[in-house]
Amino acid sequence: MQSALRVLEPAGLDEPVICYQGAVVATPAGKWLLHMPIPLDLAREAIAAVEAEGYGLNVYVGDELYVDHVTPEAERYATFQQIRLHTVGPLLDWLAEPPTKLVCIGDPDALDELGVRLRKRFAGRLWVTKSLPFFLEFAAEGVSKGSGLDFLARELGFSRERTVAFGDGENDLELIDWGGFGVAVANADERVKAIADWVCPPVSEEGVAQVIDALLDLRA
């Protein structure tokens, strides 16, 4: 949520936003409408499994980011997200409440292999996905951007059939699938483009803005 605010505040937007891969739906004013954290025992099992693979973890509890100790990977992540790191020592000794999300950082190919192993181990218990090639993320089972959008549809009263959803990454698959009309940008993951109803120009050409402008023109 903290990283989203740096975009929302300058834009003057006040509509609810989906954060943390769908685990949180919140207003820009800071009111959380939905929070689906990872159950504590399951989070501890996941932390132990990732650490046994030789990786550290970034752990979000509430809207704050915690790490065992500051590593170059954790520092790059915090800088990228423009949020503060809190150092707490061994995570399994420290963690006492369900975390919102876990993030593992590493080489994209190695994380692909790690993701395969962990999806098999936690099948039906955790949602494991990539937000960017070098971020492997963990959320509660049933959480996704699609589930967050479904919650918002019920909360705000709009229909699935009249919703246009845009995406580019692996973590957007459920979002694109949920929308009545799914749009992938041209530089999207091939899996996203495969299920999209349409592919718009790439981010370098502001493809999403082009589609939104065209839709608004149709309403004029």
Image: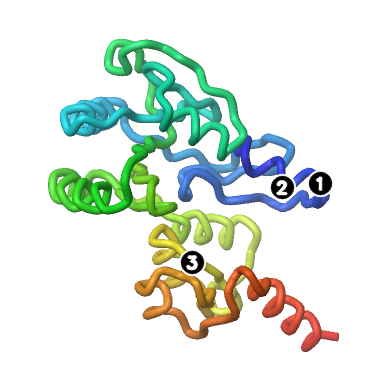
Which residue occupies 59% across, 42% down? Answer: 33
Q: Position of residue 123 (x, y in %)?
A: 18, 50
Q: Mark 2 touching mark 3, by CB under 8 A?
A: no
**In the rendering, which numbered label is found on residue 168?**
3
Q: Mark 3: which secondary structure? A: loop
Residue farthest toward the bottom in the current orientation of the protein: 218
Q: Which of 149 and 58 is in front in this view?
A: 58
Q: Position of residue 182 (x, y in %)?
A: 51, 77
- Mark 1 vs mark 3, CA separation in Å: 24 Å
Q: Mark 1 touching mark 2, by CB under 8 A?
A: yes
Label 1, residues with CA under 10 Å away: few <14, some 14-19, many ≥20: few
Amino acid beneath label 3: Asp
Q: Position of residue 98 (x, y in %)?
A: 38, 27
Which residue occupies 58% across, 24% down? Answer: 84
Amino acid beneath label 2: Val
Q: Which of 139 and 86 is in front in this view?
A: 86
Residue behind mark 2 = 7
**In the rendering, which numbered label is found on residue 177?**
none
Q: Position of residue 139 (x, y in %)?
A: 36, 43
196 over 148 or under it: above or below: below
122 over 130 or under it: above or below: above
Label 3, residues with CA under 10 Å away: few <14, some 14-19, many ≥20: many
Q: In which quarter of the image is the C terminus?
A: bottom right
For residue 146, what is the image quadrant? bottom left
Q: In which quarter of the image is the N terminus?
A: top right
Which residue occupies 58% across, 57% down? Answer: 152
Amino acid beneath label 1: Pro
- Mark 1 vs mark 2, CA separation in Å: 6 Å
Residue behind mark 1 = 10
- Mark 2 vs mark 3, CA separation in Å: 19 Å
Q: Mark 2: which secondary structure? A: helix
